[in-house]
Each structure stands twice: as C-alpha cells, then as structure tokens.
Amino acid sequence: MTKRTSTKLSELEIGKEANVVAVHGQSAVSKRLMEMGVVPGVAVRVVKSAPFGDPIEIRIRGYKLAVRKNEAQSVEVAY
Amino acid sequence: MKDAAPQPHAFKQLNVALAGNPNAGKTTLFNALTGLNQKVANYPGVTVERKHGVWSVGEKEIKLIDLPGLYSLEATSLDEQIASDVLLGKIDGTPKPDAVIAVVDATNLERNLYLVTQLFEYGIPVVVALTMIDVFERQKHEIDIASLSRLLKVPVVAVNAADGRGAEELESRVEEVIGQVQTTPLEIDADAGENAKIFARYSFISDAVQRSVKHNDKSAHDMSEKIDKLLTHRFFGLAILVGVLLLVFQSIFSWAEVPMHLLEQVFGAIGDGLRSAMPEGILADLLVDGIIAGVGGVLVFLPQILLLFLFVSLLEDSGYMARAAFLMDKLMSRVGLHGKAFLPLMSSFACAIPGIMATRTIENQRDRFATILIAPFMSCSARLPVYTLMIGAFFAGQTVFGFISLGALLMLAMYSIGIAAAIIVAFILKHTILKSPPPPFVMELPPYRVPNLRTVVQNMITRAWLFVKRAGTVILAISIILWALAYFPRTGSSPSASEPTAAEAVQMQNSYAGQLGHLIEPVIQPLGFDWKIGVALIASFAAREVLVSTLSIIYNVGKDENEESTTLIAAIRDAKDSAGKPVWTPLTALTLMVFFVLAMQCMSTLAVVRRETNSWRWPLFMLGYMTCLAYLGAFLTYQGGKLVGLQ
C-alpha cells in the first residue's frame, strides 16, 4: 500500500486529483458542503482560484462548485 | 392495487409540487407545463416567492406548485424551510401536495438525487422527471432509466423541459402514484448523526448511479471548462466582466431613455388632452397633475426594469451570473457582502429600483437586505439633473490645474461619496443589525447553457407586472398626497392670465408644501438652505429630479424649464434673501449635491423595498438612516466649507 499525502482542500494544488477523507466541524458550512456531495471517499480536483485568489473552483461528482478558502479548510483530502 | 378501492382522487383537484435543484430546468419545465397560466405571490409573511399554475392535460387540470430551487430540505435557509413546510402541509392557503415531481438534471445526477432521497421521507408519492437528457446523450453517456427507476423504487420519466415532451407520460405516472404512501428505499439509522445520514444518502446514490449509468469519461472536461478558461481568467475574465457590466449599464442608462421619453410624452399628451377636454377646476387638476402624472411616474420605470431583467435572466440562465459572483466575491466579502451583490449594486447606478429587484438572486436573506439597504447610495440617473443644474449654475467652465473640468471632478466626487457611504454602511450593517455568521459561499458553477427564451421573457413579464401591481399602487398614492400638499389650500386671487408663472409661484408659497418649507427652515438653516430649497426638498421626495421643476415654479420661471435652462440658472444665481444677500453660493450648491447623494428621496424605491422585504420596517429604516446621514453629510460640508473659507 502506498503512503498517501494528506492535506486540506484549501491547500490542494491546482489541477491535482484527491479524495476527500473527512469534513470536519459541525458548522452550517461543513454541513452544506456535505449536502453538495463533498463526503468522504469522493474524488475532488481544484480547477482554479478566482483572480483575487479566493474563492476556489473545485470539480466534484461531475459538476463544479465555488467555495471560499476558509470554508475549504474544513475538508481534509488525501492523494 | 389501483382497483382495490374506488379512486379517491377522481373528483378531487390534484395538487402537485415541483421540486428540484437550482439549474435543473425546474422553472423551464414549470413554464412548459403551465404556459401563461401561472401566478406569482409571496408566501405569507416572508419574501420567498410562491409560484403556482394550472397544468392542463386533456380535460384534466392539475394545480402545480413550483417550490423554490433547493439543494436540500434540511432547513438551513428560508427557501428550504418553506419548501419543507409546503410538503408537510403546514402553510396556510397551500394544500399539502398529493404528489411531488422531482426534477432531476441527468448531467448532474448524483447531486440532484440527494434532494430526491430526502423527498422520499415525506410520505408523498414521488415521480422523477429527468431533464437535460439531450445534453447527457450528446456527451455520449448512457443511462438505463428502467434500472434507475427500479433502484429508486419510483417512476422515472425523461422529459424535455423546453418543449414539454414527455409531459403526457409524466402526467399518467403522477396519476398512478396518487394515493400511495411513499417509502424510502434507503436504510438509514434514525439515530445516526446528521453527517452520517448525508453520507448514507450519497452512498446509496453512488451505488444506484453506478448500476444504471455508463459515463463517458472523455467528455468530462466539456465545453463549459473551455469557456471558463476565458470567462474566469485572471485577466480576461475581469475584462469581460467589465464589458458585460458596461453593456448592461449602457442599456438601462441610455437605451431605456427612448421608451422612457416616449412614455413621458404619451402621458403628457394624455394629460393635455384631458385638460382641454375637461372644465377647469380641481377635478381636472387632480386627474392631470395627480393621477395621470402619478401613473406616468410608475410606468416610466418599466423600460429599465424590463431591460435589466432581460439581462439578469440571460446572465442567470446562461450560467454567467455565478461566474461574475465567483470573480467578485473576494472584493465583496471584504465588506461582508456576497459576490452576487455585485450586479444589483452596479445596476443601481442607473436606477435602484431594478437593482433592488435583482437582489433576489442572493439566497441569504441578511445579505440580501444589506445589499438592498445600500443600493440607493449608488448615484442613479435621477440625480443627474440635480448635479447638472448645480454644476451648470455655479461651477460651469471652471477648471482645476488648467485642464480638468471642475464639473467632471465634482461629478466623480459625488459618485465616490455614494460608493464610500455604501461600503461604510454595509460594513456597519453586517456587524450590527444584520450580523450573521458569514453565509456559506458554497455556490454551484452550473454548466453554460443557451437560455430558454420563453423562461427569459416570462421572467421579464412577471417582474414588470409585480412592480406595477405592488409598487405602483404605493407610488400612485404618494403622488396624489404630494400633489395635494402643493395644491391646497388654494390661493384666493385668481391667476392673472398674463402672469401664470407668478400665480404658480404664489400658490406654491401658500400651499401646505410651502408652509412645510417654512416649518423646516430652522432645521435646514445650518445647511445653508432657505425655505424655498426646503419646499424643493420636500417635493423631490417623490423623485429626485422633481427638484428641478419645483425650483422652476418657486423661482417663477415656469415649471417646464429643464436642468439646462439658462433662465432657471440665472434665477438661482440672482436669488436674494430678505437682507439682500445671495441665497445660493457655490458652497450651497455643493451642500445640496452632497445631500442628494445620501438622501433617500425616491418613493418608488421605498415602495419596491416594501415589496421586496415584505414589511414597512425596512423602507422606513432606510428613509430614516439615509435622511440622517444626508443631513450629517450636508451639515459637515456646509459648516466645514465655511470654516475653511469657501463661499
């Protein structure tokens, strides 16, 4: 088994494919993220960041989602 | 099972709810099924729109209710709360639906099905309407509808939302399930935590989709991604956004002028026609100066509203609006606003009314209200005549450093003061009465699509009609009140035919409006204003540009003079107070301009805010705080100006 690198979604390199490991916290944001399909196991890729650096665009379950970086912090991913 | 009992619904009016994610084609399907046979109102006590219509199938008529676009039914937003309440039959005047049509976008199946798994738990029979199947097949994906239906344990019907193909099958499936009690095919532990439940739903969905859909991986990075490369590009994306805004701006600022002038002329002609056809007297005056002018004042906004909503619908339905919000969110979030507030605020530079109506795209209510409350600070086109008159009278032809026109500089200053005030007020509001945890900016970037013409036109018409119906009545009533204030009490002396303008001026002085002007004179004296300016301020509450015609009446130059009139400009420059000193100085003009930037002098805006926030509290608050701010701003300008020796 290869060792996987774990990081936050907000720090994931642009273009890199990863899998969601966990969505932390009980806030409205983390719940909304999960409802939008960001649940453990799912594949996710950061497409780009907005011109002023925030928010970021991610691709998940075949569609695109914009999230602010501080919201993406609660999502732990691994690749 | 169907013939086990007499069909209980045979004579009953069927109520069917339409539920689905935003961008799933729900509104398009609703329009295709109901045609023009639909009504829009608000749910009692809230600003969430309640849309319902009649779906005619042969001789049968089904009452269709269009729920707000939803990602979830877990009640984190007002829309979700309302939708959930409708499904539970908890809303007055909205019967519990007999069935739910779940609109599901085939190209975004997993996330769309999440809502469906929640719908299962309401006990109301569900039929899935699969939209965008044409796009799905063009991308060379394959779906086994029968298998999906088997796994979900509900009927699944492919429909074409644009032309209603599949509607008949949809209707017969709905009829079949009426009276059944919906159960859920999922096994979810009732005691599980919220996150565990969400996870369980998505696990079920992933499994069902895997077993019924064959995705073509090659088309995953589709057209939308290519378009996005340009439209959300670091540099070109922003340049294109500016271009789009310019276009929108240009249209409501200048293209709308033509029909607006036409409407003004038509109402002028109707007024003149009535005036000559009726005997002189109060009835003719009320009809012409009160009612016709009031109705005209309402309808004159229609071209701007129609045009802005044409653009808003096009931008929204094509998927661009979400990109604009994506580009601007960082800047907007600095003052605590949502990226989606950008376009409504920009539109408000032309007119706050369509701008405020366009805030409906902002889901979070507090964000939306904060945007509404600051929208009138954007210097709208109605302020231009005031700026033009003041600059024309006191600053014309002057330059700074020999080449910058002082007038242009002042104009820029007025726009900047408005923007600065908006930023400061937004910041304060978001930290006080509209304080809320930063709303999740978890926003879908939907695939680009060619907007459905029918939906766009219907949206335009609905907005325009809502404005006329709701705001129109208020505007008309206030117009009549303001007319009466200037009309009564009548000055006894009969107007001399040779000097009708003098008679008008005397009437204005003695009217209630004139008396009010005298009454507020002590209050506005620290701003350098006399009672005549006071009268003009009161009258311009109806609409800012009325200042010009009111000053014309008061200064005895006839009410038909416009802001570039040399006679009006001369009259203002020559006006002397009782001591023989000039009433107006450049400083007075500057103070008046600052007052107009900050003051809430537009009853139409207030009427629209009343309608959009569903309470008088917000428009009154808006009027109150903006008037205070305007007074403060004008006071500081005048007194500060005097201190530094300005005249």
Image (cartoon, rainbow, N blue to C red):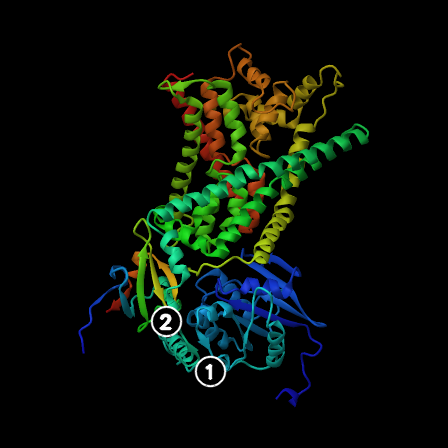
Asked if the residue under mark 1 is in contact with the one under mark 2, i.e. CB atoms within 8 Å, the reply is no
Amino acid, disc 1: Leu
Q: Is residue B440 visible?
A: no
Looking at the picture, does residue A30 appear above or below residue B357?
Answer: below
Q: Which residue is labeled 2 in the image?
A: B217
Q: Quadrant of residue B41?
A: bottom right
Q: Which residue is labeled 1 in the image?
A: B151
Amino acid, disc 2: Asp
Q: Position of residue B539 (x, y in %)?
A: 60, 30
For the image, the number of numbered tags is 2
> Foreground residue, B605 or B31?
B31
Q: Position of residue B136 (x, y in %)?
A: 47, 70
* Quadrant where the N terminus of chain B is found in the figure: bottom right
Residues flagged by tags 2 and 1 on a common chain: yes
Q: Name the residue at 60% across, 67% down.
A: B164
Looking at the picture, does residue B352 appear above or below residue B360?
Answer: above
Q: Give the CA separation, mark 2 to mark 1.
A: 23 Å
Q: Earlier in the sequence, mark 2 or mark 1?
A: 1
* Quadrant where the C terminus of chain B is found in the figure: top left
Left or right side of B604 for B24: left
Question: Which SS class for mark 2?
Answer: helix
Q: Position of residue B333 (x, y in %)?
A: 36, 49
Q: Name the residue at 40% across, 76% down.
A: B201
Q: Quadrant of residue A25?
A: bottom left
The chain under label 2 reads: B
